[in-house]
Amino acid sequence: MEIVLALAIGVLTASGVWLVLRPRSFQVLIGLTLLSYAVNLFIFSTGGVRIGAEPVLRGSAGSLIDYADPLPQALVLTAIVISFATTALLLVVILAARGFAGADHVDGRRDDEA
Amino acid sequence: MIQHLVILPILLPLAAAAVLMLTGARNRPLHGVISIAASLGLLAAAVALVIQAGGGEAAATYRLGDWPTSVAIVLVADRLAALMVLLAAVLGLVNSVFSLGRWARLGPFYPVFSQLLLMGLNGAFLTGDLFNLFVFFEILLAASYALLLHGSGPRRVKAGLHYIVINLVASLFFLVGVSLIFGVTGTLNMAALAQRIPTLADDTRAIFHAGAAILGMAFLIKAAAWPLGFWLPRTYDAATAPSAAFFVIMTKVGVYALLRLGMLCFGPASGSSAGFGGEAIFVAGLLTIGVGLVGMLAARDVGRLAGYSILVSAGTLLSALVFREPAVVAGALFYMVVSTLAAAAFYLIGGLVGSDDGDDEFEDPPLLEAYDPDGDGLYTEEDERAVIINAPLGLLSAGFLICTLLIAGLPPLPGFLAKVAMVAPLLDGPVGPLPGAARILATVVIASSLFSLTALARAGIQMWWAEPDRITPAIRLHEGITVGALLFALLTLTFTVNVPFDYLDATARDLLDSNRYVGSVLEPEAPR
């Protein structure tokens, strides 16, 4: 379980970093999205990876062993919303830059110049 | 009632932004009234906060919803936070007055984003919790994206694209750092964090250090430290003048966060973590000063010049604030206040003069295009009613001269006093992060004055003397008054320097004694 999660985070981060360093704005956008997936998984994993444990208290409380840490889940929810919103904003700016420059290079260069 | 004062600097701009949204994009006179009233109210709240923080021994804390401290979202208004809120409020007022008329007409809802930026800034300064620091960072960044893109045009959109991508990556660093710290310590409350660090086991301490270093990266990107700060001069130069002047405080948010966490988590009381990262930040700060000075000498227009001068001031602050000596910290804080206001005034003057750099595909950006999608004439009688000051060239060059003296740090202005206050205790040789660090920093700060003066004097000669047939820029009355009032306030600081200094001295002592902060945040509970 841990190794699968760690590999997933690693692969997402590696792909994301590579894409962010690419010159096309759409690749940068996808790269940032992958990176934020990786970071969200990472935040989630800081609460400890557990199967079948709930974060919310039920009728009989029992001991803390039976529950997952709810705080990373709350944090990751906030992080998802924020990164989603800012990525959407970035998409708008990318479209505007595409409109002004007539090319999707991040520096606004056309293909013949690049 | 008075205990709610701490949250007022967050709620007031939020409410103002909401009201401004509801009044619609077209009602500009009403926008002006509301945003100036909100900014004045915020300034009053900030002054009250400073008085409150300056009077008491313990920092005022505010637990949202009155939850117990261990689970509450807590706001803390100690001396440093109150000072930063006051600085943000001053810049907010300057922004809301200056941007009236032609600047706000470049796009819709300019005052809304200004108020939201203020909300994010104040929240970042007041929060006592790492994750809320992240949330407020995102609020202020989202508002700053809009303020940067205000007025549109290819140059701004290109700079905005880079700026947004860099800040999104920085936010991801922030999240990774925060979650590593949470995973190791089990808390995000800064005071509880400071309490738990001395008791960390050695193997988890290494992970904690890694998390703190990654978090520090995010703050260094915001503070535009070398080599993470190359985005700043171009980005700020592309923004409209009031936006750029407002953005000056955003590098100080990074410096503030580093200072706060550095003092709380890596202060003398933190066991074997004491002073972690100090060497790296010190060296990065020195290199930032170097890059800023080279950039200032190479800059060919006021916007770039101001941008690189921000790098110099950020580098100076980063290097000076790793010293654990009250006098140095107090001097550096005074330097932060003066250099922030001076750089803001410099951007405003630069905006009034108008950009005239040759390689600009978007010449004279602020004055030409108005946002007018329906073509129904936003240039109405507002423009004709505007009072235009005569003989602005003399006024502008006088303002430029004052800014030069402030930024280069020449007597008799407070820029000089700030540098003296910072350098004099350094010459006594306090223990720094590296051997001989104090003397190196003192030398670099003094040398940086010389280089700044050279660059600014050259720019002044080119701007005011070498262009006999330059067109006299038209200045609106409120713009002149804003810049004049800002510079006048800085001049008055020369004569009343004792008042802020007593406060800053107490601030520095507060910071170095992290138990005071921890005690006032966690006090309501029994000691663990």
Image (cartoon, coloured by chain):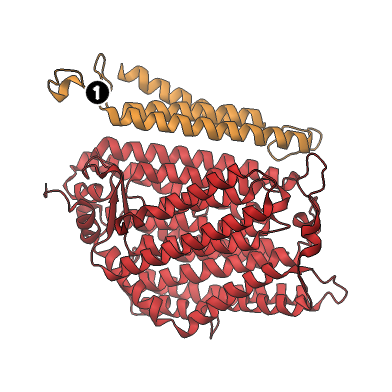
Chain colours: A orange, B red
Q: Residues within 10 Å of mark 1 (few under 14, many from 20)?
A: many
Q: Residue at x 49, y 83 (%)?
A: B494
Q: In this view, does B87 lie to the left or right of B193?
A: right
Q: Quadrant of residue B204?
A: top left
Q: Does residue A38 show up? A: yes
Residue B347 in the image, given as x and y percentages of width and height: 64, 64
B481 shown above or below B527: below
Nearest the viewer among B373 and B281 is B373
Residue B232 in the image, given as x and y percentages of width and height: 59, 54
Residue B511 in the image, given as x and y percentages of width and height: 30, 63
Tally of marks: 1
- Outermost residue, right side: B469
B402 shown above or below B291: below
Q: In this view, does A110 lie to the left or right of B141?
A: right
Residue B264 in the image, given as x and y percentages of width and height: 28, 55
Which quarter of the image is occupied by the N terminus of chain B? bottom left
Q: In which quarter of the image is residue A61?
A: top left
Q: Residue at x 33, y 27 (%)?
A: A73
Nearest the viewer among B513 and B434 is B513
Amino acid residing under circle 1: Ala
Q: Is residue B403 left or right of residue B442?
A: right
Query: Element at badge 1?
Result: loop
Q: Does residue B275 show up? A: no
Q: Which residue is drawn at 25% across and 56% down?
A: B274
Disc 1 target residue: A68
Nearest the viewer among A82 and A49 is A82
Q: Which chain carries label 1?
A: A
